[in-house]
Structures are given as C-alpha cells and as structure tokens.
Image: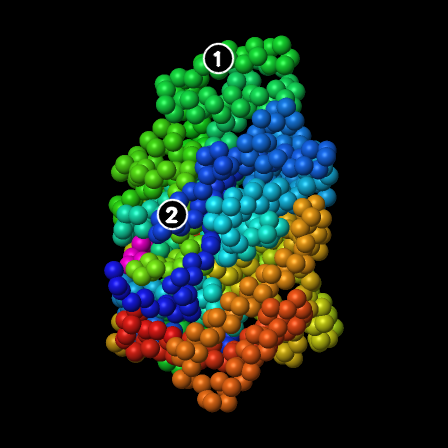
Amino acid sequence: MALLQIAEPGESVAPHQHRLAIGIDLGTTNSLVATVRSGMSVVLSDEKGHPLLPSVVRYTADGNVGVGYAAEPWKSLDPKNTIVSVKRFMGRGRADIAHSETLPYDFVDAGGMVKIKTVAGIKSPVEVSAEILKTLRLRGEAALGGELTGAVITVPAYFDDAQRQATKDAAQLAGLHVLRLLNEPTAAAIAYGLDNAAEGIYAIFDLGGGTFDISILRLAKGIFEVLSTGGDSALGGDDFDHRVFCWIIAEAGLKPLSLRDTRLLQGHAREAKEYLSQHGEAPITVKLSSGEYVDLVLTTDIFTEITRTLVQKTLSATKKALRDAGLTIAEVRGVVMVGGSTRMPQIQHAVGEFFKQEPLNNLDPDKVVALGAAMQANLLAGNRAAGDDWLLLDVIPLSLGLETMGGLVEKVIPRNSTIPVARAQEFTTFKDGQTAMSIHVVQGERDLVSVCRSLARFELRGIPPMVAGAARIRVTFQVDADGLLAVSAREQTTGHEARIEVKPSYGLTDNEISEMLKESFSHAREDASLRALREMQVEAKRLLEAIRSALISSGGILSVDERARIEVAMGHLQSVVDSDDRPAIDAAMKALNDATDEFAARRMNQSVQQALAGKNIDQVTL
Amino acid sequence: MSFENSTLRPDFSADHFALLDLPRQQALNGDELGQKFRSLQALVHPDRYVQAGDAQQRLAMQWATRVNEACQILKSPGKRALYLLTLLGFDPQVESNTAMPVAFLMQQMELRENVMAARAAGDEAFLEAAHATLCRDVAESHQQLIELIDHQHDYTAAADLVRKLMFQEKLLHEINDALEAVTS
C-alpha cells in the first residue's frame, strides 16, 4: 500500500514517529491498561499474564505499598490498611458514602473529601488511586519500552466535577500526562462502533462494580455524538453484593461481625452472586472466626427478589436518558452491554425487555472501556492513521448552577449540554458600597442548594464600591472537553477583574497536591525537578514541531515581518530547549505562544471559512 | 441569551445561522443542522489540536464552545425565534413585557396545579396525557412561529407567541420532573 499520508489539521507526525499512549480504565473493582499496537487495541497484561489489576491497595508500616494481586489476599487479613473500591470515595465527603458502617476503615472527616487513616499515615482517595494508576503506568512503560506521551483515563459518565477533578489529580500524582478524561460508556461506544462500523442511535448500558451509566449516542460518519447520559455514581455490583451480604446475615441470624468476618462474608456474597450467573443456585458455606457457621443456598429467585429495586433504578435512569435525548425505544438501534455486572442474567433480561431487543454482548464487558480509551489515546497522541478519522462529542451529565438568595439554585448550564460549553450570568450587589461577594457553585438537578452537590465557593473581592444594585458582576462558567469546570468573574461597568478565591468543597487544593507530589517523590527517590524539566522539554519540542509544520502548511497567511517574529521566538526556544534552565525554557515557550497567537487565530478562521465555502471537510487542510 | 461572545478571541462576527451555513429563517431542517454542526465540530474541536501549541488549543476550545452555543440556540425553536427576531432588529422584550392574555394565564395556572396534584398523587397516567397534549400544543406553536416570522413577517405576534411558548416549555419541564419523581 503506497498511499500518501496527509496530516490532519493541527497535527504533524512524521510517519516513523509512533507516540506511546495508553488508555486506562480505573475501575471500582478492577483496573486495566490498554494500548494500540499495529492498529489493534490490546489490553496489556502483567508479567504473570493477568490482564486485570484488582483495584486494591495495601499500606504497610514500613512504608511499602502493595497494589493489585499483591494486596488482594490482605483484604480480610488486614482490612484497615487494605483499601478496596476506593473509587467510591473519590471527591466524596464522609456523609456521602453508602453503607459506611460496614466498611472497616478509620475514616478521617476533616470536611471536604474523606480520608483514610492507615499504618502508613492518612491517605486521601486521590493518593490511593494514584498508586493504582502508577502501577498501570509502569506496566504500560515496560510493555511499550519508553516514556509515555500521555494517557486517556476513563471516568463514569455520571461523575460530577469533584469526582472528575479528583481523578485528574490522581493521574498527575501518578506521573501521567492526561490527554483526556473520557466517559466510560463513550469509550465503550468507540470500541464497539469502530469494530462494527455501527451507524445510528445506540444505548450504552454500563454497570460496573460501583457505578452505573447509561449513555445514548448517535454514531454517524465517524462522529460519536453523545445525546444524553444518565446514571448513578454510587450503584454497581458492590450494591448487589451488599444485598446478598445483608440477606446472609438475616437468614443465618448472625451476631454483629468482626471486621475480618465482615470482609470474609462480603467476599462470599460476591462469589455467590458470580456463581449464580452461571448456575441456578449458589451454595454459601462459611466458617466465621466467631465460630459461627453459615450454610445457605442462594437461589436465582431470591437473588432477583432482593435486588429488584437496584435493577429498577437502572431502568429509571435509562428512561430519563431517553427522554432527555428526545428519543423513543423504537429509535434505538442497539444496546451495548458494558461492565462486569451486566453478566448477571437479571440485568440482561431486564434490559432486553425494556428495549424490546436482545442486548449486544459481543465485546468483553470487562475490557471494552480500556480498549476504547486506548483508541482515543492513540488518536489524541497524534498517531492518526489514514481512514482512522473520528471525533467524540460528549456532554456534561449534571446541571451546573449557582446558589441564589434563599438557598435556591439558578441553573447556568443544563445537563446534557455538549462540551466544551460556556455560559455567563450577571449578578449585582445587595448593599451600598459592597466590595465583596460570595458565590457558591453547585451541581445537580434539584432546585434547592441543600440537595445538590456543592462544588466550590468563590469569594470575589475588589468590586468597586457603588450603590446597591449598580454593580454588574458577570460570572462565566466554562466546561472544557474533559468536563471540568472553570469559573471567572468580571465587574462589567468598570471592567474590573474581580479576584477569585476558590475553595473546592470536596477537592484538593493545589498546595495539597504539590505536597503529595513532593512526598511521593521523596519516597520513590525519583527526582521531582528532573522529571518536571524533562516534561517541559518534551512539551517545548512538541510546540516547536507543531509550529514548524503549521508554517509549512499555511505560512503563506503571514507577512514577512510576522513570520520573522515567529522564527526568532522559535530560534530562541530551540537554543534553550536542551538546557536544564527550566525558567528559561518556560519563558521562551510563553514568548513563542504569544508570538503565534495571531497566526493560530487566522489559521482557525481560514479553515472554518474554507469549510463554510462548501468544501468537504477532508479536502480542507490547515 | 446572557452569554456574550465579546470576551472570546476568534472572529465571531458571523451570526449563528451564517456560522452553521443555514438560511436565516425560522423554518429549519434538523438533520441539516445536525450535519453542519458535526462537520464544523470535526474541524474545530479541541481533540483535533491536542498536539498543537497552547494558543491553538485555547482557540479550538473557544471555537468549539461557540459552535455548541450556536447549535444549542438554533436547535430549540423558541430560542431560535428569539435570536432571529433580535437579528432582524426586533426587540422581543422577553424580560420587560410580561403582559399575557388573562385566559392563557388562567389556563396555565390551572394546568400547573393539576400537574402538582397528579405528582403528589402519583398519577402517572394523567401526567403522561398532559405531557402528550402539551407536546402537541408546543409543536403547533413551533409551526405558527414559522408562519408568523418567515411568511407574515408579523414580529409582534411572533414575540407574543414566543413568550407563551416559554411558559409552555417551563410547564413541560415540570411535567417531566413530575414524571421522573412518580416513576422512580
């Protein structure tokens, strides 16, 4: 095949330069890492051939950290220091955690995101998740044989801003460059859609270990457009296990359990559930450390009965997502099943009945999310091959709003808005001479602040003193392609940029993150500043390469002077890029970015105009 | 819409219709809008510029935001009408003119009360029926808007209708919420 390759807009990869990129499915129960090799997305296994990494982290007194299979045997032996299902705690406060009374951890509740006290000190869920991500990063680097350009990390579509931010922070802590946070059902849609050349409306039903998502997508000519999404970020296989666990306790009439026995019984509950997926009934025989015996049989009928409300919850969310998309069941072409928990026959049956069609199970429900993430990572890293041309358009799952007088919520961006999205709202002062204003950002669908998620509080200071009602403060919400929110504010009458202080309600501050980074480095004896330097050099070289190719393809829109200015800035960056002078590289990059601002704007305008002039998209080059 | 583009850098002088290459009128082919929207996003979306410099990435985000905004407004017949009336130099006075025919207001209030009662009583059948009726009314208003704006050029009547439509859409939203509350 001697086809000529043409670089896509904004991209410039020499054919021999394959960039190393991975996709990570950071799951509640298991995590995976995948990559695209010779055009095929593959899951990377560990040295023993295990594709899955149990999402289990164990801390020991000597400061060692065990992850995955190394930590798993300790779940019931050392329950306080062996953290499972940490994803449920990401961006969550103490009060948000369901069944926390049956969890063995010493929770530390200092407001904001919950933390866990271990023998190795107090750990944030972000740090625990970072251990899992780091293990997967090392697996990826070992398999690919080099430094990674970046990673796509998946999150439940129904994750709110705090949960997304926590995931991104964990990735940073694990030394990963995040190319994109990708919604899990969207990742599955990519893997399914590209494998099957699917076109039309598809529903992705994703029931994992701890989260449930339903996404409705339109697949058309390489564009994956999410029309709506819904779900429950605290509903998954764990909850089905918990129902079985409670049933065992009630049936066997057990006394209050020790931590060890709780973990032991939870394990048996899960095994019984999984066994039931293949067999009509599951025997449960356990000898507890208290000397009590459990000898029960869980039948399909009992299981169906005790989990009925959970299944119902998934269907309610599905109904709502369809309504949001303005679609009927008849318009749905296929229902793709994702997540280990969709193996339960009850789920298969309920979904089939709801959609009046057989669900699609032709992809491994455990792997499909990681495979899709790897495909997206490969694309974003710039390894786009000919014909490999597709784009994702995703949405925010929950409305974003502000608290107004009386504890009410003013919605600023409604749920299921396509991202990136920006919206502004104007406010005024309440008192004469008021110079500060407090703004509370919330996420959720209800009209009352008290039942929405608090995301952050902002203090605007430096508003010029005026009579009440005269100041006009414009607050702008911008949600980027990762689904993350940024807020800015400006006083309109004077143009005064109000200073914003952000206090994330359930997140970590920048300071906390840099402290954690420092700590993790001192532990691993890696040199933080050396890594930061290397990252900056890579970034700088990427910028140089991008601009060089932009000059080749569309340098014609620049005057001689303009071009010379850019070339000077490039030359300057080139001269410092290999030095170890970080501030100098940083300054040169900033200067080059500034110098190319106008160039970038013109190229963008030009390409849009060309597109509007009726040219086919694939004829347009930048 | 309270969102202004003035804070954004790119050349946003084109109106939403021009941006999406659609005729400046109330009648709109939804499939065509979807198609134009997707083609444009395929060009400007930030995912296309992950490897480019900061400036280009920032611009891509602004462009994609702009395209989403345009599509979101044009997609909704009510928002489209408001936007179009403003473009045509007619002030629809949505904020200032709150005068409504009494009969219409009474009817809306009664409907709303019935919806609240049905919600409290868990009467799904009533809500479904009210939903269907209102959807028909809304669809009829959409048709009328096309007639009033595109053919009769009666912008005053169109603005009145848009204000009614906003009431209806809000009620439709409440019925949806009620249905959600009742069925979950």
Q: Is residue A515 visible?
A: yes
Between A574 and A311, the one lying in front of the other is A574
Task: Give whichever of B26, A363 is nearer the camera.
Answer: A363
Span of residues in magenta: A218-222
Q: Is residue A551 magenta?
A: no
Left or right of A392: which side holds A455?
right
**Mark 2 falls within which chain?**
A
* Amino acid identity at mark 2: Ser
Residue A162, x across and y down, in percent: 58, 51
Residue ID at (52%, 70%) = A543
**Residue A296, horizontal then vertical, whole percent:** 48, 12
The disc, 2 or 1, on the residue closer to the chain's N-terminal end is 2
Give the quarter of the figure containing the C terminus of chain A: bottom left
Disc number placed over residue A296 in the picture, else none: 1
The span from disc 2 to disc 1 (Cα, nearest Å) is: 43 Å
Q: Secondary structure at mark 2?
A: strand
Pinpoint residue B159: horizontal percent, then vertical percent: 38, 72
Is residue A533 left or right of A150 when viewed as pictured? right
Please determine whether, in this image, residue A251 is positioned above or below residue A412: above
Where is residue A612, by image quadrant?
Answer: bottom left
Task: Assess disc 1: are there few (<14), some (14-19) or many (≥20) residues with their C-alpha within 10 Å of its C-alpha.
Answer: some
**Amino acid type for the residue under numbered disc 1:** Leu
Which residue is identified by label 2?
Answer: A41
Mark closer to the observer (2, 1): 2
Return the x and y of residue A263 as percentages of the image width and height.
59, 24
Mark 2 neighbour density, 10 Å: few (under 14) some (14–19) many (20 or more): many
Q: Secondary structure at mark 1?
A: strand
Q: A76 or A406: which is nearer to us?
A: A76
